[in-house]
Amino acid sequence: MITGIMGQVLALGSLILAGLLFNRFLRIDLTLACMLAGLLAGQGIATIDFDTGIRAHNLREIVFFIILPVLIFEAAWHIKPSILKSWLTPVLLLATLGVLISMFVTAVLVYLGIDHPVGFPWIAALLTGAILAATDPIAVIAQLRSSKAPEDLTTLFEGESLFNDASAVVLFMITVAIATQSEGAQSSYLGFFAMVFVGGIVFGLIAGMLTTAFVLLIGSSSASQFILVFSAFASFYIAEHILHVSGIMAVMMTAIVARYSLREVEGIVARGIAETWDWLGLFLSNLLFVIMGLVVTLDMFREHWLSMIIAIVATLIARVMSVTGSSVLSRWLGKPVPVGWQILLVWGGLRGAIAIALVLSLPVSLPYWWTIQSMVFGVVIFSLLVQGTTNGLLVNKYADTS
């Protein structure tokens, strides 16, 4: 059993290494390279009778208890608290009002576009909207840094992505719960939304302070790396299984509190932490793209090409409305977002690791799961091939807009 698991882990790790090689020699984006490695491997797996260990019943546990805590904690750790504080108003608006606008506009457009209430009901459209509300602008952030764009713009992207992902994951989990239960249970889930969301934040604040206390008490940089990694998994597990609040919000707040509290002594007790999260994030985020490549089939494109196009168009329209609406309100509240930056936020709102993680965790008991998965994969591929490759032109033009 253990040797089988080890073989599967090594095989998936080897595909990430293949992706790194494709990235190096083919000069393509790393996420796209890992997806290509998975896609090529997926075509040959059947012929060599290799078992990847990827199953519908275990993907949700792998995604929610291993991958997402690391990705959320890693994203939160890299944000500079001082700059985030100055852009907190637009960030929170994009992550709350913006996510809701994106979710519902996408859902309405997809529902009307597919126009099949029996095979693709309203709850399926809502699930699609929740998944596609999560942005993952890693490639854009790299472009911003390489072009020496203002640090405020980079932080705006990072902060919006972090809070946006946390909100989208919470909405997705509640929507899945509604979709898998009877209609009579819907009101209870909607009624507990605020408690789940706020409860995760409160527990995350406490967990972050405890994590900081342990790091300062031990006073060792090596031990600090273990404590912080442990806190990412522990905060999620305790929040979800013991307190029954949002684990994602708990992980996010744990990371933010620890990062802010340790900023003055990071070079002493938290040396090397950034590098630790870098390689963990690299491994797990690209693992998702490898898995995506493994499960993509040509039948998806043959049977759902129109649905993919509808989802792409719906996502772009929803993103425009989300960014515009949030920016208008942010201006009223005294923190305007430059028009050029709004353009970058719209086109740079790529869909990537988080969207893949969520759609891979969809229960296959839902009759429309494959349609949703096909649409999300189509949007992600469009993000990688079109938005990701052309966004650099917009960065050069609008990054210095004030």
Image (cartoon, helix red, strand yellow):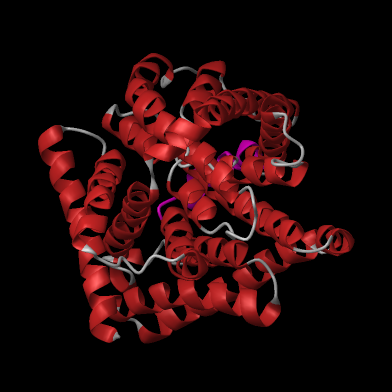
**Relative depth, front residue between 245 and 88:** 245
Highlighted magenta segment, given as a residue range: 78-92
Estimate the x, y position of residue 211 in percent, counting from the top left.
49, 77
Q: From this viewpoint, is residue 350 visible?
A: no
Residue 324 drawn in magenta = no
**What residue is shown at x 66% (from left), y 64% (from top)?**
201
**What residue is shown at x 23% (from left), y 45% (from top)?**
40
Q: Is residue 348 left or right of residue 146?
A: right
Secondary structure mostly taken by the magenta-highlighted segment of the chain? helix
Estimate the x, y position of residue 391 in percent, counting from the top left.
38, 23
Considering only vertical position in the picture, is 137 above or below 396?
Answer: below
Estimate the x, y position of residue 306 in percent, counting from the top left.
54, 26
Estimate the x, y position of residue 218 in percent, counting from the top left.
37, 85
Q: From this viewpoint, is residue 311 visible?
A: yes
Total labels drawn: 0
Considering only vertical position in the picture, is 237 above or below 385?
Answer: below
Q: Is residue 323 left or right of residue 281?
A: right
**What residue is shown at x 27% (from left), y 32% (from top)?**
146
Q: Is residue 150 left or right of residue 368?
A: left
Image quarter of the N terminus = bottom left
**Relative depth, front residue between 42 and 242:** 42
Q: Is residue 90 left or right of residue 72?
A: right
- Determine the image quadrant of residue 381: top left
Considering only vertical position in the picture, is 389 above or below 174?
Answer: above
- Determine the image quadrant of residue 209: bottom right
Q: Which residue occupies the extreme top position in the image? A: 397
**What residue is shown at x 63% (from left), y 61% (from top)?**
365
